[in-house]
Amino acid sequence: MTIEALRDDFPILRREIHGKPLIYFDNANTAQKPAVVIEAVDSFYRQHNANVARAVHTLSEEATTLYEQSRERIAGFIGAASAQDVVLTSGTTMAINLVAHSWLAPRLKAGDEVVVSQMEHHANIVPWQLLCERSGAVLRVAPIHDDGSLDLEALYGLLNERTQLLALVHVSNVLGTVNPIAAIAEHTRTRGIALLVDGSQAVPHMPVNVSELGCDFYVFTGHKLFGPTGTGALWARRELLEAMPPWIGGGEMIESVSFDGTVYAPPPRRFEAGTPNIAGFVGLAAAIAYLQAQDLAALAAHEQALGARLRAGLAAVPGLRFIGSARDRVAVASFVIDGAHATDLAVLLDLEGVAVRSGQHCAHPLMQRFGVNATLRASLAFYNTADEVDRFLVALAKARGMLG
Ligand SMILES: *Cc1c(COP(=O)(O)O)cnc(C)c1O
């Protein structure tokens, strides 16, 4: 396997931006899609398009089979014991809101507590905040160390008999920090506290096995995993799913409906009201199959080497401060540079063909923790190269120079 050969699988990587070859370093925002994903979506609409689980005609059966095969593919990829433990959602945001409304809301009482960390994405803050406001429960925040690692001692100190849920990111989208989920899950399990893990930034970079992690809920989004937008999943322990009432009502999620009462379908269908993103899940299954055909350990090692090269280059930039330098991390570098605003740098970098994210990365509390109002973030994927890292560093030096 060579990275150049893999790059050929991603049509967009051949693009030029402002006459320069694209350097796509915004993978934590969304990842690019290999041709097999684009073709799977295309061929679904050309050959198999129909609604799922409604009609007995051949196309509907094919669409239903493809949709359920996607669920199986996802379940296998994350080590779920059964595909029936996987709810297909429009993404991480919807998956977290489902747990908030269906699992947490019915049990949350005034005085209860929900714990998150300072490094959460807004998607793993706001749904809990809304519920707490409504019920009189308290949202508590576990602090992080200056290097961007979680303060485990402080976290464990926050948990008590009032804690209903700990909601924690697996890998931070800003810091790149990898949290020690298995150890944390052991702790929450012995204390009888439910643990939800936001795996949005983990699944694109490392093998994840929900059965081995020991958490109660695991969520991720498909578009950061080289699949289509509008796809994602919630995995939950079976007994939790069984006990969860429906949240969104409609078609597809019922056994029978009458005005005297409606009988709901068992999970996961109970949570999939309405017509789902069928083509999107066909594409996500293709993305996962593509990944499973690669040597993932080699790709992870390549990414780690690129991340180290990137950080070494950035460390030599005068006035640059990293936001996040924990030991256990993925190839994401967030930083600020004295005298150069992140957004100005990002605009100048775009002129050099470089796509990076500037801003607050849907993590305002984290920005406040580090006393910055924006960072520049370069986030890598396996299809990035050492040459791109080097050209990025040159482009950054040029942009920095232009800002005086
Ligand atoms: C992107 C992201 C989300 C939100 O994912 P959506 O696809 O927008 O629902 C949540 N958490 C983390 C850590 C993310 O990186």
Image (cartoon, rainbow, N blue to C red):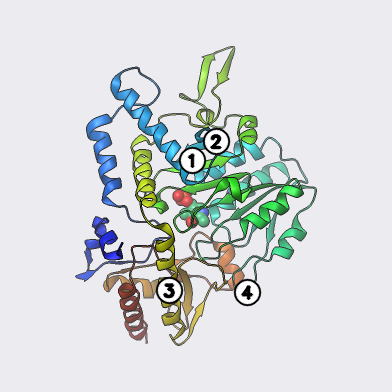
Q: Which residue is mark 3?
A: 342
Q: Residue at x 59, y 51 (%)?
A: 197
The earlier-in-sequence mark between 3 and 1 is 1
SS at mark 1? helix
The earlier-in-sequence mark between 3 and 4 is 4
Indicate the position of residue 148 as horizontal and vertical percent values: 59, 70
- Looking at the rendered structure, the kind of residue marked 3 is Ala
**Relative to the observer, which residue lies in front, 232 or 335?**
232
The earlier-in-sequence mark between 3 and 2 is 2
Is label 3 or label 1 in front? 1
**Relative to the observer, which residue lies in front, 245 or 403?**
245
Is label 4 or label 2 in front? 2
Q: Which residue is mark 4?
A: 146
Q: How far is disc 3 from disc 2 in space, using C-alphas?
A: 42 Å
Is label 3 or label 4 in front? 4
Q: Quadrant of residue 117?
A: bottom right
